[in-house]
Amino acid sequence: MALAKQKQELTETRLADVRLPEGNGWINAARADALARVRQMGLPTRRDEYWKYTDPTTLTAIAAPKAALFENDEGPLFADVDRVKIVFVDGVFDAEASDDLEAAGMTIERLADAAATDIHWVKDIYGVLETRGQDPVHRPLATLNTALAQDGVAIRVTGKAEKPINLIYLHRDETSDAALHNVIKVEAGAEMTLLETGPAASRFSQVLEVEVGEGGTFHHVRAQGRDHERRAVTHCFARIAAEATFKSFTLTFNGVLTRNECILEIIGDEATAHVAGACVGDGGDFHHDDTVFITHDALNCESRQVFKKVLRNGATGVFQGKILVKEGAQKTDGYQISQSLLLDDDSQFLAKPELEIYADDVACSHGSTSGAIDEDALFYLRSRGVPERVARNMLTLSFLAEALAEIEDEALADELRDRLETWLSRRS
Amino acid sequence: MLEIKGLEVKLEEEDKQILKGVDLSVPAGAVHAVMGPNGSGKSTLSYVLSGKDGYEVIGGSATLEGEDLLDLEPEERAALGLFLAFQYPVEIPGVGNMTFLRTAANAQRKARGQEELSAAEFLKIIREKAKSLKIDAEMLKRPVNMGFSGGEKKRNEILQMAMLEPKMCVLDETDSGLDVDAMKLVADGVNALRSEGRSFLVITHYQRLLDHIRPDVVHIMADGKIVKSGGPELALEVENNGYKDILAEVA
């Protein structure tokens, strides 16, 4: 079907001066294929149903809007965690700041290196999971990333990883436009934790493709950067095999536009997939969108979506979450909750929870709420001597608790909780 | 300790007067009970004293050891030594009971210019007090009042009281929803806190709580006023004859 004229113009304008990054291996074909697919799908506009609540204009524009650098006195996250640091500055790998790319239980390479070979395991995942994730809803910004991303990491986990990998995304240039593409393969029975921290760029496009093999475990904890004017569109595509575990948590502070898409496909029996997010936004230019699509295509699997947003001073939160249970995916246990705490009348939360079920023996539930601080709880705390400001922050943190509880590692959760506490107390 | 004079209160949202001139004086170390039929204004009195939103004071005064309570924020009243044991303790998901209590205790200490308790000091004190109220460590770890039975919630109120060591304790229908054993446990907790420097205002429908917490004075409240005051025998009279006779007598 021909694209609508407006969409076609937008797409051609954006792609007019695009030149695919130079590679000399298998990746050339993957990039060319992706570019062709972008042309075919067209870039998103507000008129697309999937972008009804979030305006993609600044994400599809040729140039990245300027984003001031954010500085405060807080140290970097996870500084005390024994981890492998891999640093990208405005999307460019920083070898000096990064640790050696090695850790027991896995091999770590830069995508740029993996792409330069003729044969590589990454080839079977790069752009492949992204392509699978285009049905039934198009995600052309992910495809554009597949075409344009210059770098990223390729991690293959073969055993129990001895320490987490921390991708650190620094933002130093006010007009940077970065695209990174990360590919992870967790082999059968293997285990790893991926940490991602930082704002990355003025405009950041990121795709993460994860293949979790049978009985494998993938933990993902992400804290998107604090820079108020930054924009980010991220896509996580995961394929989850039998008895495997996938758990992803994202904390978002600030940012003028964040769209985090998570597309999970459960293909093996007895697998578990959890995706959670907590966000705190302050001000009319804060816009945060969580878009999730979980496909159950196996027996006896569990999925959980827990998304909580604290919105104040006119901030906007969006949640689009879908559970698709395919025919034969019996005994599916699907849970989805999206909630917002609106701290004033100007903030808004737009939610579109969906269930589509073709199996007859499943337990799926979803709920979505918007509310204010519970006045009874506030009075209860104050009557015990807790000052109003502190009491409000306690209740705000307690609202986020269910999402934070999805983080497996207590120490990581505590650190993020501390950051949230600081963020809240600075604003009250 | 607590002096209430001619207290008149209306609902903020409606033009409805609830308290119509309450006079009440609770000396230091005394236990006073307020009894009365439904809708007489007992719970409103407790809320107004502790500073809940939604009420407008249109006359009279309430002081704690000479300090005007009515102009203060709820947390300031708490720091002065006022404590309200809630009829319906609020469940707060995501806030640990222990964190809550420590935050409260230290906020009060800070407001009074006292040194804050360290985690270790706090833990030692709370464990001791919890033990006497048969509150186990598991309950302390859970979110505030979440999944607590009616009896557990009320015991948790008394634990907070014991921890915060207020001067003036207001108990709002603490007996509601309790079976006999639970009531006895709660009453024992309260009795253990009785001292020369601490006063109690026990609000209740029924006389049975007053079998366990012996009051010095019993007040009968009706239609927003104290209509009769007397000794513990007044509570027995209510138990035997209901409020009808007393109300008829003062009408």
Image (cartoon, coloured by chain):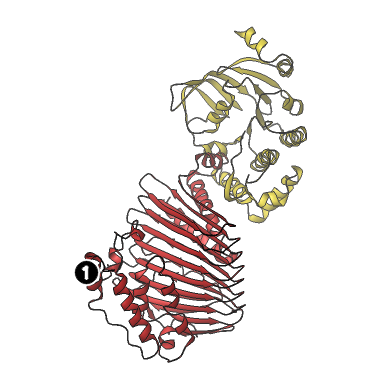
Residue designated by label 1: A9
Identify which amino acid the numbered label 1 is placed on.
Answer: Glu
Residue B126 placement, left or right of A193: right
Q: Position of residue A327 (x, y in %)?
A: 53, 63
Residue B33 placement, left or right of A419: right
Q: Position of residue B74 (x, y in %)?
A: 52, 37
Q: Is residue A417 above or below residue B15?
A: below
Label the yellow chain with its letter: B
Read off the chain for label 1. A
Whether residue A287 is visible here, answered yes or no, is yes
Whether residue A250 is visible here, answered yes or no, is no
Q: Secondary structure at mark 1?
A: helix
Q: Report which quarter residue A141 is drawn in.
A: bottom left
**Residue under the image location 72 percent in, 13 percent down:** B241
Q: Is residue A425 above or below residue B229?
A: below
Q: Position of residue A254 (x, y in %)?
A: 39, 60
Q: Is residue A371 above or below residue B43?
A: below
Q: Position of residue A200 (x, y in %)?
A: 38, 72
Q: Colour of chain A?
A: red
Q: Report which quarter residue A383 is drawn in.
A: top right
Q: Report which quarter residue B152 is drawn in.
A: top right
Binning the other alpha carbons within 10 Å of mark 1 as few (below 14), some (14 to 19) or many (20 upward) gives some
**Residue under the image location 60 percent in, 75 percent down:** A214
Residue A1 placement, left or right of A197: left
Depth check, front residue: A17 or A340: A17
**Residue under the image location 43 percent in, 55 percent down:** A426
